[in-house]
Every structure is written in structure tokens, then in C-alpha cells.
Image: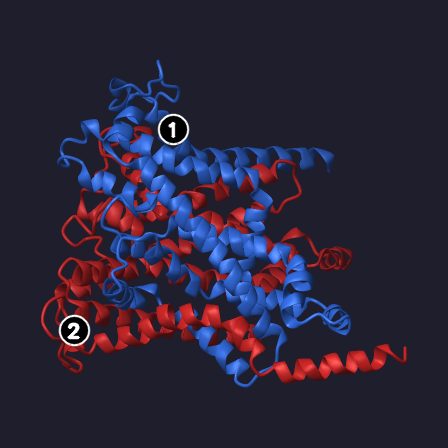
Amino acid sequence: MRILAPAGFQARTAARKRIHWTPFLFLAPYLFLFVSLRLLPSLIGLTISFTNWSAVGVPQWVGLANYQALFIDPRFRDALTNTVIFTAMAVPALVGLGLAFALFLNQPHQGRGLGRVAVFTPYVIMPTVVGVLWTWILEKDFGLLNVLLGRQIPWLVSPSWAMLGLVLAAVWSMVGYNTVLFLAGLQDIPAELYEAARIDGAGAWRSFWSLTLPLLAPTAFLVLMLTIINTFQVFDLVYVMTSGGPGTSTLTMVQYVYTTAFQFFKFGYGSAVAMVMFVILVIVALIQTRAYRRGLESIY
Amino acid sequence: MRRRNAITATLWYAVLAGIVVVMMAPVAWMISTAFKPELQILTTQIRWIPDPPTLEHFQTVLSRHAIWRWLVNSVVVATAATLLVLLLDSLAGYALARMEFFGRDALFAVILSMLFVPLQITVIPLFLIFANLGLVDTYAALILPVGANVTGVFLMRQFFLSIPGELEDAARVDGANDWQIWARVVLPLARPALLAVAIVTFLSAWNAFFWPLIATRSDAARPLAVGIAQFLTLRPGLAQTVQAYGPSMAAATIAALPPILFFFALQRHFIQGVSMTGLKG
């Protein structure tokens, strides 16, 4: 004991001396990549959006000109509208079905593991493959869906159906993710609460409305937020299935960023489109967080 | 009561069957089409089992496209990116969770704030950076940006916050330095968190499309996700879909089966990993 105590003390003081630089050595490799490939690019992106930078020539500072041009750009308006429509169609389906699947698969029956695997499998297939697969399923004359329906719906080749076709593929491929998140949320609710509710005479519906739903609110909030962010940035499926067409009927924001920046090499303008997306996402996140807080206050 | 239970159970199984069929039918249809002779593809007759099954579409795809190369590229990139993230994020996450230094919380806030910045904003500058370094169309261009991710650091930090400090104190009394504590005490405990980060990183690197589409120009580094996407765009005219679907589905099957089998083998870890990053990221 007499020997150990000073030794431990020494070790601790030594650690205190090193403390000034050891943390930074631990952080350095990550920070190097984070700063150079994430933080700086974000700031550069903001800066570029105020210039007329393209692949050739010297970039010039143009102030807000790119943003002003966006206002009267009909393709940008289409991209924004389409993205909002896609989000408005896909989000309720993804969140609603995800919740329904999770509630269903949370029932204590054998075989729910199989259901969970089936629901999640599409999520592990890469989105571009999902796009190729669904282009075939939605084919007008011989696609599986039309054959089953006994109709010839022009899913991806008509402007009025193309968006719905994309939504179908997106919901199929991503609903498993939400289901898994909801299932995790459901399993976090302590079983004793249901036991207590049952003893107090609450039926299945009553405990669902008064226990499950309120306690699932944090999960639902998170799932809603993630789903909005993900669907708002839809790109892979659009790129493969419609390339934004027919016409501009499925042109989305990210697709527009891609075309302006990497097909027409208007880096400044493309960055401005991306910045608008960022601002919209932040606003949505802020509104949701406020609504969520207010909702929580009204529950408790 | 018992009869009512039996009825609900039967109903439950009927719905389960419905869900399984709807979710798995597209996958089954993909595999089925891939093995079908040409004449059985473009027909309004639904036939699930090809008769006779054929490998011609696989031969077509493999002879015309560098699909093995894309597969190798995807495996190399996703594996390297995962190892990189595991190393960097477990180091950084440990420092952020367990060490005290000036500006730690501010630094963590800056890292977290990048979660809200969509990747599309960074993609244009990233392209310019890698073009200037002459690294476009290389593995480095695909791997390094994954190392700048936020979720991995966040998850590792959360995990390290949850382990009791006495273990580290004991190791320190025994004379271990910070590096030894990290490598011998903390990392072995972090296996569940490391596995979750590994699965999620691998899956997202494997599926990544937007950046790889921009950062690759040839088959040398092109990953599967990008290669497959060009299948439909490369087909000769929209009208001539006659020849496209067999080979497309063969390619889709080649690309989809490895992750599906991987998922079947590791399902519990997969689902845990994904729900962890979702709920806490």
C-alpha cells in the first residue's frame, strides 16, 4: 500500500501533464478528414453559390445573382414543386406503413422474425438496383404490376403517373428502415406499464391510445424527421427510373443540382440550388422541433 | 375467449403472409426474370419458375460489362471505408467522450452540426478538391470522404460515455497510458458499438451513388451502384426494351444477392445496428 499510493499519484500527475496534447492526437486523423472533406467543402459550397464559377474561365463574385435567377427559373420551380410533391406522397406512406408494420410485427406470435426480415430485405438492396428492378415491374405492357392489375397503366412514361411510380418504388425500398426504428421504439416501452394498465381495467384500444402512442412520440418524431430529410434528397431512383422525365415531371432538386453542376458545369448555380435545399431542410427541422415540443407539453 | 384468440391468430398469420408476399415478390420476380428464356419474359402470363431456366442473360451481362470489376471495386471501397471509419471514429469518439481539453464541447457541436448539411452542398467542392489532387477516378476519392462522416463519431462517443470510468482508472493505476487504455481496455468493450458502426458504414458505402457517380469516370474505380445505374440508360433506345430486361435483371440479381445473403446471415446485428444509428444519430 505504501508503495502503490505514490505510484498511482505519479501516474495521475503524468496523465494531467500529457492531457494537453494526447486528445488532439486521438482526434487528429479524424479531424483532418472532417475539416478538409466535410467542413471546408460546406463553407466553400456556400461561397461558390455567390459566384458564376463554371468549368472554364475565372470565377467572378456575383452576389445574390444566382439566387435571384432561381426565382424566375421554371426548371427550378418544377424541381422544387416535384420534390415537395414526392415528399408529400412518400412521407405519410413511409411513416404510416412503417408504424403499422411495426405494431403488427410487435404482436407476440411466432413468425414475426420472418416478417421483419421480409420487410427489411428491400432496404439492403442498393437503390440503383431497386430502380432497375422497379422499371421492369412498372413496365407498361408486360410489367408485373400491370399484369396483376390487368391494366396498362403508363407508369413511368406518362407525366401524370411517373411520380406515383417513383413513390411506389421508394416506399417498397425504404419502409423497412422505418419499421425497424418503430420496432425499437416499441420495445423500449416497459412491459410493466401495460400490465398496470390492464390491472386498472384498460382494454387493448385504451392502452394503445393512452400508452403506446404517447410513449412512441419521440420515435415517431425522429422517424418523421429522417424520412423527410431522406425523401427530400431523393436522387438514385429518379436518376435510374426517369432521369427527371418525361419532360420535367419527375425532375427533383438533387437531380437538378446534378444536371446544372455536372452536365452543364455551372458550379455556382448548382451550389445555389443545393443551398436552397439546405435552408429548406433546416426550416423544416426547426418547425418540427417546435411542434414536437409543443405537442409534448400538451401530452404531459 | 380461446376461440377469439384462435381467430385473431389466424387473421394475424393471413396478414403476415400478405406482407411477406408483397415485400418479397419484386425480389423473386427479379431472380425469376434473370433466369427466364427471352420468350417467357415479355408476356402477360405470370410464370414464377423459368422453364427451362437459362444462364444466357448472365453470360450476356458478364461478357458486355465489367460487372466483376464493379463488384470488386465496391467490395474494396466499402471494406476500406469501414475499416477507416472504425479506426478514426473510435479514436475521436474516445477523446470526445473521455478526455478533457479546451473547446471539447464546442468541437463536438461543430461536428454534429454537419449532420444537417446535405451531402449535395459538399459534392461540388469535393469534386474540385479531388480534381485538383488528380485523384478523380481512384479508390481514394471514394474512400476518404466516408472517413469524414459524423454518425460514427457520434455513436462511438455515446458508447464510450456509457462505460464505467473505474476500468480506466484501474488500468491507469497499473501504469497504462492513454493509448494502451484505448487499445486494451476500451476497444474490447466497444465491440457491439463497433459492429453497429461497421454494418451501417458498410451498407451506406456499398449503396452510395451520388458522389461515386461524379467521382468515377471509368471501370477502374466505378462501383457496382454506379455501373448498374447505367444499364438502363445505356440500352439502345427506349422502344427496344425487348432485349433489355433479361440482362438487366441478371445484373440486378448479381448486385442484390450479396447484401441480401449477408443480411440473412447477420440479421439481428443488422437490425440492431440500423436502429441504433437511427435512434441516436
Image-quadrant location for residue B194:
bottom right
Figure quadrant of residue B14? top right
Residue A40, how many percent across, how many down? 34, 74
Residue B171 appears left or right of A172: right
The reply to the same-chain question for discs 2 and 1 is no
* Foreground pick, A134 / A51: A51
In the displayed structure, would residue A26 be above or below residue B3? below
Chain colored red: A
Residue in the image at 27% along x and 56% along y: B215
User: Residue B92 vs residue A94: left or right?
Assistant: right
Q: Which mark is residue B114?
A: none
- Crowd band around label 2 with a 10 angstrom C-alpha radius: few (<14), some (14–19), many (20+): few
Place of residue B208 in the rendered image (x, y in percent of width and height, measured from the top left):
36, 52
Q: Chain of mark 2?
A: A
Chain that bears disc 1:
B
Q: Residue furthest front?
A: A3
Whether residue B157 is visible: yes
Q: Secondary structure at mark 2?
A: helix
What kind of residue is marked 2? Phe
Mark whose residue sits in front, 2 or 1: 1
Mark 1, residue position: B31
- The residue at 61%/32% (across/down) is B10
The chain coloured blue is B
Q: Nearer the viewer, residue A149 or A23?
A: A23
The kind of residue on which mark 1 rests is Ile
Residue A265's image quarter? bottom left
User: What is the tally of numbered marks visible in this picture?
Assistant: 2
Q: Which mark is residue A71?
A: 2
Return the x and y of residue A239 as percentages of the image width and height: 25, 50
Q: Nearer the viewer, residue B269 or A148?
A: B269
Mark 1: few/some/many CA within 10 Å (<14, 14-19, 20+): many
